[in-house]
Image: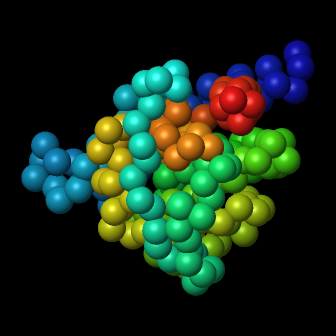
Amino acid sequence: MSLAQRRRVAFVIAGAVLAGLLTAGCGAGEGVSDPAAGGTNRYVTGDGTSSVFAPAERSKAPRVRGELLDGGQFDLAELRGKVVVLNFWASWCAPCRLEAPELQATYQATKDLGVQFVGVDIRDERDKGKAFHDSFGITYPSLFDPPGKTAIAFRDVPPNTIPATIVIDRKGRIAAVFRKAVLRDELEPVVSKIAAE
């Protein structure tokens, strides 16, 4: 069995074991409000859907600005001309921990193609977010967004689950959305194809 196959089997097994944690840990009961239950934001347990949009079907990404975990400032507009991968995560989210090494590996494999990854740490504490970055060796920046304003701004394709990943093309349009934890072998081909456009 190849490394990629072993990784996929381990991910599937871990996903099955953690399915309850996804619902309990990343759903309405743990820092994430379910609007159907009277919560104040739009985060709900994910449905696992993914969508990749043809260039003619892409809508413009909203303005994304804010403070980074390290205290610096971020403005998505400054990355125009690059493919941007926005990943919504939280330190308390078990599936986020499973996908973190996959995202870092995809970032390393695609950054020379003009791809920039940016995390969005939501419903979290700064110290816990920094510890998450350190423990998984994440080398790309993350916005610190406890109220989840960044996710709410994506009205056309709401990343209404944690984790969720949105890919923005070089023209600032939404090219793909993954409402689940993603593996490198799923994300990298999509990012590479968008980078080659």
Q: Residue at x 32, y 38 (%)?
A: 156
| Residue drawn where x is 39% and y is 53% of the image | 62
Between 172 and 100, the residue placed more toward the observer is 172
Q: In the rendered view, does 24 fall on the left or right side of 90?
A: left
Going by the picture, which residue comes out furthest to the right? 2
Q: 176 or 14: which is nearer to us?
A: 176
Q: From the top left corner, tell me how far across and down residue 143 is, in percent.
A: 53, 67
Task: Tell me the quadrant of the picture where the N terminus can be found.
Answer: top right
**Vertical order, 120 against 113 (above or below):** below
Quadrant containing the C terminus is top right
The location of residue 149, given as percent across then percent down, is 34, 63
Q: Position of residue 17 (x, y in %)?
A: 54, 33
Within the image, what quadrant is residue 80 found in? bottom right
Which residue is depicted at the point 52% across and 26% down? Answer: 55
The answer to whether residue 159 shows anywhere in this view is no
Query: Which residue is outermost to the bottom?
Result: 71
- Image spot of residue 88 (x, y percent): 49, 52
Left or right, 65 with respect to 194, comes to: left
81 versus 184 height, above or below: below
Relative vertical location of residue 139 with respect to residue 69 in this rendering, above or below: above
- Colour convention: rainbow
Q: Is residue 42 left or right of residue 53?
A: left
In this figure, what is the number of numbered marks? 0
- Point out the residue furthest to the top here: 1
The answer to whether one can see residue 121 in this image is: yes
What residue is at 72 percent from the left and 47 percent from the top?
A: 115
Residue 141: which quarter of the image?
bottom right
